[in-house]
Every structure is written in structure tokens, then in C-alpha cells.
Amino acid sequence: MRSAPTSSKSQTPYERQIPIFPLQTVLFPGGFLPLHIFEPRYRTMVKFCLEHQSEFGVVLIKEGKEVGDAATPHEIGTAARILQVEDLDDGRMNIITAGEYRFQILEVQEHLSYLTGRVRMLDDLDTEIESVSELLTTQTEELYKSYEKLSSRLIFAWSPPEEQPDDPRELAYQVGIRLRISLEEKQTLLETIPLEQLLTREIEILTDQNRRIAFQLAAQNN
């Protein structure tokens, strides 16, 4: 197992060109995604990312499949940075990646064996948090704590994170990662760009999920 090289370049909200990896998953910033890389085109993509210290875009498949002809991705995805690589004897790789930022695909190119895209970073890291009310953040925190506690009572193997983020954006991302909802619902959350709107929608989902879990627990005890 080897660690991937890290880039000294800071992320900026400008457009950039990155490889695109359509998958049957939704990755949020702050989330970890292990991947088994076996198709030649994605081996090439990973090698490019390692050589150029580049992230690649993880995007939920809109049409098509992971294997075979290139699938059509959704427009909104998350850039993934490769953290570790395990090289296997036959050329396959196991990699561990971490989500960094949300992006919008502006243009897709198909001139390589894998998709590439011109993308635009979506989150305003400097000013957006200032517009989020303390009440909204507190309400999300309280509902999320209840969600983790109820889930751990309902699901034996459920293991809540050791820490809960104080930063509203990181909190919103962690909630998106942890919610047991469909991929389509997760994609809708990922596409909810203003942070205040994202937290508001997560409050609605958490309220509903907590009610459902409480009902299941009550039914088990009867």
C-alpha cells in the first residue's frame, strides 16, 4: 500500500479539467470512497491522476452501467482525491479516495478512453457560511444527534462517528453521507447548492427519518 502524492496547489472556485468517473454511488465532500480499479481505461485514469496530482470527478450514473460503454453522468458530482493505492500483480488497483468539493459539469469530452470534463466548483468557501443562521445549524445538529442515537439502537452494527462537525458545511456533508436514503435522494441533496437550503432540506429528512425509526423501535418493544 502506498500513499498518493499530495499537491501543494490550493483549491479555487475556477473552472478546471478533470477525469470523470461515473459510478452507482453519490460521494459527498468529506466522505471516503474505496474503489477496486480493474478496467484498463480507469487504470489509465488513476495513473494520470497520480502522475499529475489531479483529482477525478465521482458522478452518479444517469444512464448506462459502470462497466462497458461510457455511462451518462449526472451534471453535479464531487471531486475525489486519491489517498492510498494498493497495486495488485495483474495491474488492478485498490484505491482509497476522499471527497473534496462539489462541482458542475460544464462540458464532457470523450477523446480519451475515459471521460473528462470541464467543471466548475460550486461551493463558496469564503462567504457562504456567514449567511447560515445559528438557529438552522443548531436545529440540524440536534436532529442529527438524535438520528445517530436512534439508528444505533435500531441497527446492531451501526457505529456513529466519534465527532460531530461544528462547521455548518461539514455538518451538512456528514448528514448527507450518513443518511440511509436512496441514491436519487442523495443526489438531490448533493445538487442543493446554497448551504442554507441544503440544511433546511436535511432538517426535513432527519425529522421524517427520526419519526420512522422511533416508530420501528416502539413496534419492536411491543
Image (spheres, rainbow, N blue to C red):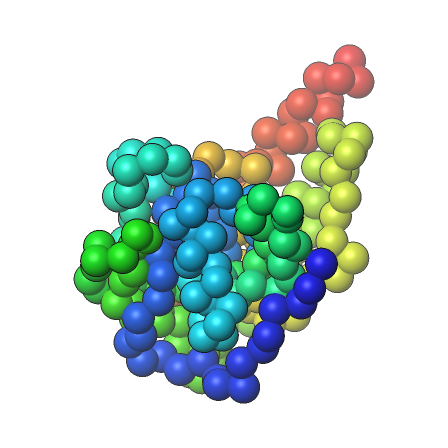
Residue 192 percent location from the top left of the image? 36, 56
Q: Is residue 9 left or right of residue 192?
A: right
Q: Nearer the viewer, residue 60 or 179?
A: 60
Q: What residue appears at the point 26 percent right and 67 percent down from the top-left corner?
A: 118
Q: What residue appears at the point 73 percent right and 25 percent down from the top-left corner?
A: 217
Instruction: Give the quadrant of the N terminus.
Output: bottom right
Quadrant in the picture for residue 12: bottom left
Q: Is residue 32 left or right of residue 108?
A: right
Q: What residue appears at the point 60 percent right and 33 percent down from the top-left corner?
A: 211
Q: Is residue 188 above or below residue 214?
A: below
Quadrant in the picture for residue 116: bottom left
Q: Nearer the viewer, residue 37 or 32?
A: 37
Residue 185 percent location from the top left of the image? 41, 40
Whether residue 208 is visible here, answered yes or no, is: yes
Residue furthest front in the image: 90
Q: Is residue 146 left or right of residue 73?
A: right
Residue 147 percent location from the top left of the image? 66, 43
Residue furthest top in the image: 222
Count of numbered circles on the image: 0
Whether residue 76 is visible here, answered yes or no, is: no
Instruction: Give the quadrant of the C terminus.
Output: top right
Residue 214 percent location from the top left of the image? 68, 30
Q: Nearer the viewer, residue 211 or 88?
A: 88
Q: Nearer the viewer, residue 206 or 156?
A: 156
